[in-house]
Image: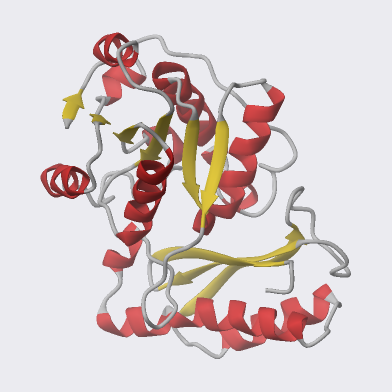
Amino acid sequence: MQVVKTVTEMRKLRRQLNEPVGFVPTMGYFHEGHLSLVRQARKENSTVVVSIFVNPTQFGPGEDFQDYPRDLERDLELLEREKVDIVFVPSEEEMYPSGFSSWIDVEGVTERLEGASRLEHFRGVITVCAKLFNIIQPTRAYFGQKDAQQAVVIKKMVADLSMNLEITVVSTIRESDGLAMSSRNTYLNPEERQAAIVLFRALSLARELWQGGEKDADKIRHEMTSLIQKEPLARIDYVSIADANTLEELKAINRPALASLAVRIGKTRLIDNVLLKGGK
């Protein structure tokens, strides 16, 4: 496994890689969710590249950029076990050199849900992903369903800009009690960790109502909200039942839908979602 720190070195190495190339962009501090993406990439490609970069431009004022968990040594050990070929670990200065002023925006799908709550978040996500795609030139790139809106936005950017790569979205990996795995779960104290299960309970309720024949999106949102409000440590940011592709809020679930939410448990903001489609 080679660890690469500069764009110049990565580009030089890229010319020597066996095709196809699978790429997993990450911010590190790996859990089973990240590793599931790596394993999928390993299964489907001759070469696997993983990037580790805590991207400052996707964090808003007062968010947890400085506190975001980091453990590069542990991450590299885990990637070596998964037989990753190359790990790209650029510095902030390498990705955003002095005078950097070029940004990519995707309109519409970025303005809802996370975009409404976290201004400028997606501009940072889209720009860094576009830059990484340009540097690494993967055949396929892998993202997790837990960040469902991010996956929708990246797919839209790739299609709109005619980028020559395939985006693969891998199912959310959960703890035994249903909590979606996230690097931010480490912020939770034991009481908050127990309270955080309410996100999955609310999403499970949405799925049960839908599977039972409920098509009224407002009613499902109301039931989800009521359940969450019974948890004293939970503060709702948003509860959504939206079109799975456009992320526009639905009145009736008459096409594939995404039930998603953002909830603060103590000081920690957690997101999660389930797809309502295909009878699942």
Give the residue at x 41% y 23%: 19
Q: Left or right: where does residue 189 sit relative to residue 127?
A: left
Give the residue at x 63% y 37%: 155
Q: Which residue is at the far bottom?
A: 230
Check the image and report above or below for 24 versus 217: above
User: Can the viewer see residue 63?
Assistant: no
Q: Nearer the viewer, residue 134 or 93?
A: 134
Residue 223 x %, y % = 71, 85
Q: How is the image coloured?
A: secondary structure
Quarter of the image that includes the C terminus: bottom right
Instruction: Determine which quarter of the picture holds residue 137.
Output: top left
Q: Left or right: where does residue 207 sit relative to residue 200?
A: right
Q: Left or right: where does residue 197 sit relative to residue 30?
A: right
Give the residue at x 59% y 37%: 154
Residue 176 x %, y % = 37, 81
User: Can the viewer see residue 28?
Assistant: yes
Give the residue at x 49% y 14%: 101
Residue 94 x %, y % = 29, 17
Residue 260 x %, y % = 63, 65
Instruction: Determine which quarter of the picture holds residue 135.
Output: top left
